[in-house]
Image (cartoon, rainbow, N blue to C red):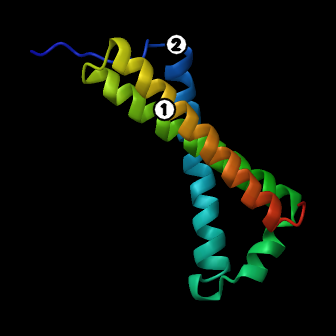
């Protein structure tokens, strides 16, 4: 039988955060789909409606947390998948740096858009 390998240390912080973010994403994704496909049908979603939803502090915070959590969960998963495939040494450091910069840029841009949509900028 093949030996099981994971870059996550069982019970470690990365392992725990991956599970917590997954649980959070399941709940928030369900909320997101409910809001944008059942309460507001896709054909009825407008720029003005999005601005109105983003002006609600609870909705705004939920969407920003959704962005941050999804970014962390996705990038952490990709990074650990690459490590599991044997990425090591200098390429591992380069990939970590590139993914970190891309993550920060994505969260910064997404937060900026959310702030603009909420009328805070």
Q: Is residue 108 above or below residue 14?
A: below
Res. 24 visible in picture: no
- The residue sitting at 69% across, 83% down in the picture is 46
Q: Residue 45, image x and y in percent?
A: 66, 82
The secondary structure type at the circle numbered 2 is loop
Residue 21 coordinates in the image, percent (x, y): 58, 37
- Crowdedness near tag 1: few (<14), some (14–19) or many (≥20) residues, C-alpha within 10 Å: few
Query: At 65% from the left edge and 49% from the top edge, which residue is drawn?
Result: 66
Cα separation between marks 1 and 2: 23 Å
Classify mark 1: helix, strand or loop. helix
Instruction: Determine the residue located farthest toward the bottom in the rendered image.
Output: 43
Residue occupied by mark 1: 98
Q: Quadrant of the C terminus?
A: bottom right
- Position of residue 94 measured from the top left corner of the image (x, y, whole percent): 43, 23
Q: Residue at x 83, y 75 (%)?
A: 52
N-terminal label among 1 and 2: 2
| In the displayed structure image, the side of residue 99 where residue 64 appears, left or right | right
> Mark 2 highlights which residue?
12
Q: Looking at the image, is mark 1 or mark 2 nearer the viewer?
A: 1
Residue 72, relative to residue 16: is it above or below?
below
Position of residue 83 relative to residue 46, above or below, is above
Total numbered circles: 2
Residue 48 appears left or right of 100:
right
């Amino acid at each position: 039988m093949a030996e099981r390998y994971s870059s996550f240390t069982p019970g470690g912080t990365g392992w725990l955060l991956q599970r917590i973010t997954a649980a959070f994403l399941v709940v928030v994704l369900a909320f997101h789909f409910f809001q944008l496909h059942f309460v507001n049908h896709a054909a009825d979603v407008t720029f003005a409606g999005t601005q109105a939803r983003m002006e609600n502090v609870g909705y705004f915070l939920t969407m920003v947390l959704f962005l941050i959590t999804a970014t962390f969960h996705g990038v952490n998963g990709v990074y650990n998948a690459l490590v599991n495939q044997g990425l090591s040494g200098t390429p591992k450091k380069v990939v970590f740096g590139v993914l970190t910069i891309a993550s920060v840029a994505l969260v910064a841009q997404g937060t900026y858009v959310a702030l603009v949509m909420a009328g805070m900028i």
